[in-house]
Amino acid sequence: MSGAALKLYDLAGADDNCRFSPFCWRAKLALAHKRLAVETIPWRFTEKDRIAASGQGRVPVLVDGDKWIADSWNIACYLEDAYPDRPSLFGGGAGRALTCFYVGWADTVLQPAMVRLIVRDIVDHLHPKDRDYFRKSREERLGKTLEEVVADRDKSLPAFRASLAPLRTVLKDQPFLGGASPLQADYVVFGGFQWARAISAFALLDKNDVVHAWRERLLDLYDGLARKAPAVAA
Amino acid sequence: MSGAALKLYDLAGADDNCRFSPFCWRAKLALAHKRLAVETIPWRFTEKDRIAASGQGRVPVLVDGDKWIADSWNIACYLEDAYPDRPSLFGGGAGRALTCFYVGWADTVLQPAMVRLIVRDIVDHLHPKDRDYFRKSREERLGKTLEEVVADRDKSLPAFRASLAPLRTVLKDQPFLGGASPLQADYVVFGGFQWARAISAFALLDKNDVVHAWRERLLDLYDGLARKAPAVAA
């Protein structure tokens, strides 16, 4: 126990140190951006009872004193409002509103496309008690077995890479989505890449891609917070 | 001639009042947002010589005194910097940086998808002197005839509407992409819809879509600037 005032329930795999949730990474980078120490608590999909005080059953869940805050977007907004003297995650009210579209794009375009490439790899890293839950819930949602979902992933890769074109438009001209320095918008998009990196060796990005260079910059932030996390990919 | 200090070269069709360029609409709404009067000058694709002073051959081109500014993004940034006392298009430096991704998404995802639905309809509204240029340049770019491009558009429509999911994530919670009031990000995305509306009766949006309701709000802005423009669609 670190004694940090803030605690974050953070999805973990069979190894306590395998932390792969893209949404938890959005929250962890938001906390680091705010220079707030946090104790992350490994949590598994099937441990709904441990976060019942949040009123729902998914992570990340932030605990700040007697407050329980669920959902990475709610957590970012909570941190921005509760710790206004720390570096801003949005750069103002307009920035906060404009960041919503990044959440929409990551949730409806980027991460669903990643699922079709790497979802099968997740199983190998899950805690045994989560495996049946994960496979059953995901196969119901996707309408096929996880093996079927990723069967043609080599063929799907060019379309996935092409779908990152909006990021390239930005990153050819500035180092971060937030401009000269990163903002929550960067963490929202990066969460997906960090998720993939934790559990899959499948190379999502070409090394000559400006998105790859941006990902490297994100990995280096906050004393290498994301780079130091156990990962399957480089 | 209105005597306005600012002039904007604005793509026009056979009818001088048919103004359909999505990029010109981004610029016209930026000018309206800044409460700046502008004289729009009808211009055709083949009149490269008239905007040679801008150093390139496409519109919008803004003329402010002896300055010629090409490209809708450059124009928005110019207006923000040259008229800082007027309402901000970005809501600050972070907002400006965060708006780049909207440009990337509109340019690489939204508008290319719209092209595949409505590009043939544009021909019917072009000035006769532009028709050969437009068909030849677009058919070369698209690798097929304009008629072939749109042949299956009814079948493509569900995928197009699904591709708007990131907008819905935002617009279910706030009236504009910019938040409680519109910003340049709204104009960047709206430009595509206003382009389609000017030259095609094809119904891109379902009337129950939150994106449709947002489009209606954009049409109403600035005394109905966009709604009053001649249009084929409602």
Image (cartoon, coloured by chain):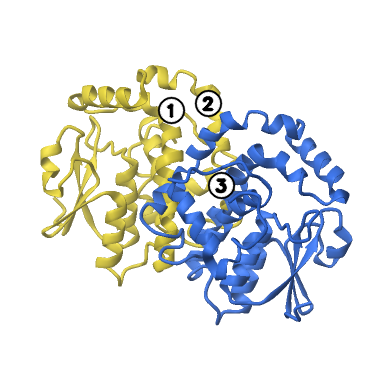
Chain colours: A blue, B yellow
Q: Nearer the viewer, residue A135 or B146?
A: A135
Report x, y in % for residue A3.
76, 81
Is A107 displayed left or right of A131 in the figure?
Answer: left
What residue would you read off at disc 1?
Answer: B116
What residue would you read off at disc 3?
Answer: B166
Q: Earlier in the sequence, mark 1 or mark 2?
A: 1
Is A193 displayed left or right of B108 in the figure?
Answer: right
What residue would you read off at disc 2?
Answer: B156
Is A36 displayed left or right of B52 in the figure?
Answer: right
Q: Amino acid at mark 3?
A: Pro
Q: CA distance from mark 3 to mark 1?
A: 20 Å
The reply to whether discs 1 and 2 touch (Cβ–Cβ < 8 Å) is yes
Q: Nearer the viewer, residue A183 or A10?
A: A10
Q: Amino acid at mark 1?
A: Arg
Report x, y in % for residue A74.
66, 65
Is B225 displayed left or right of B166 in the figure?
Answer: left
Question: Do the residues indicated by labels 1 and 2 lie within the same chain of the protein?
Answer: yes
Q: Nearer the viewer, residue B104 or A134?
A: A134
Q: Amino acid at mark 2?
A: Ser
Q: How many marks?
A: 3
Q: How packed is label 3: few (under 14 Cα within 10 Å), some, or many (20 or more)?
A: some
Q: Earlier in the sequence, mark 3 or mark 2?
A: 2
